[in-house]
Image: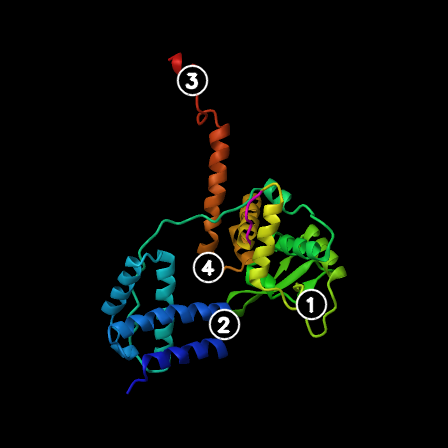
Amino acid sequence: MSAPLPQQVQEFLDYLRQVRQYSPHTLSNYGRDLDRLLAFCEQHKLQTATDISPGHVRQFVSQMHRQGKQGKTIQRQLSAVRSFYNYLSRQKITHHNPANGIQAPKQEQRLPKTLDADQVELYLTVQGNSPLDLRDQAMAELFYSSGLRLSELANLDINDVDQAAGLVTVTGKGNKTRTLPVGRLAKAAVAAWLAVRPEIPGEHALFTSTHGKRISVRNIQERLRKRGRETTMHQDIHPHMLRHSFASHLLESSGDLRAVQELLGHANISTTQIYTHLDFQHLSKVYDAAHPRAKRRSKDEDKGE
């Protein structure tokens, strides 16, 4: 007899944590997505994984859509269900995957927000010499210099930065590591922070809080937001905005999509291709402003017809 569904879900999450060594953030996402599945199954009196049919999964998707869940959220939910059933299949518990072939409702693709080069320059202008200022400067410079994810920067240790070579080694999604170049100004900012970073026994984190512990992702977000508000930009800046700006500016200058993919740590190049849309928007504006056949005629020219 099959084990109860909640037990099977917990065993799957244990597998992801112990064998696949997924990050706490990724595990939290899987847990939340599968909790939604468990709630749906309880509502429809589905007790084991073998009770769930493709029809049930379609009903589950429709329910989320009616609740206002975005297509991206539903797609992630379906991905979690497929992964769960792939695990059960390897364990010889089920022989079918009811989520296969079922798609989330499509939604309009939203382009990531980016800063232009002048805005980045304004944001990264040095703002004070206190230890907190130097730490925040180094974090902001690293985000833009190397295109780091928020979790990647938060998890950096001092030894992950090779000052002499100008390189930083980060651990990204799927516990995959990659080594990235660090720009001249970012390298100088990190050196300035390390010169004043308190010596904390047993703490190897590159960036620490005022409490002497590894800085949290929430604290990083708040410090970068505060920094943006205090400049003449008067706008909230978040880590992913700097990462998106890094990718967009690099692609705009080089045109090398594959290299940008490697630097960002994207497993699939289709994820990186979002930045080609940003680049095309920029090119379209240049074309509209410069091309003789694209320029709008003045009102006087129109009247002369």
Residue lying farthest top?
304
- What residue type is disc 1 on? Asn
- At 41% from the left edge and 71% from the top edge, which residue is drawn? 31
Provide the secondary structure element on which disc 3 rests: helix
Q: Nearer the viewer, residue 183 or 221?
A: 221
Give the percent coordinates (x, y) of residue 236: 54, 48
Of the residues under marks 1 and 3, which one precedes in the sequence? 1
Give the label, 1 or 4, closer to the camera: 1
Q: How is the image coloured?
A: rainbow
Which portion, as a residue range, is magenta?
A: 234-238
Say the numbered circle drawn on residue 268. 4
The residue tagged 2 is: 22
- At 48% from the left edge and 53% from the top edge, which residue is drawn? 272
- What residue type is disc 4 on? Asn
Between the C-alphas of marks 1 and 3, the distance is 63 Å
Vertical placement of residue 142 versus 52, above or below: above
Between the C-alphas of marks 1 and 2, the distance is 22 Å
Vertical placement of residue 50 versus 251, above or below: below
Q: Is residue 235 magenta?
A: yes
As drawn, is 62 to the left or to the right of 109?
left
The residue tagged 3 is: 299
Provide the secondary structure element on which disc 1 rests: helix
Q: Is residue 281 magenta?
A: no
Of the residues under marks 3 and 2, which one precedes in the sequence? 2
Give the percent coordinates (x, y) of residue 138: 67, 55
- On the image, which quarter does residue 74 sit in? bottom left
Q: Nearer the viewer, residue 225 or 275?
A: 225
Q: Are marks 1 and 4 in contact (CB under 8 Å)?
A: no
Q: Main secondary structure of the magenta part?
A: loop
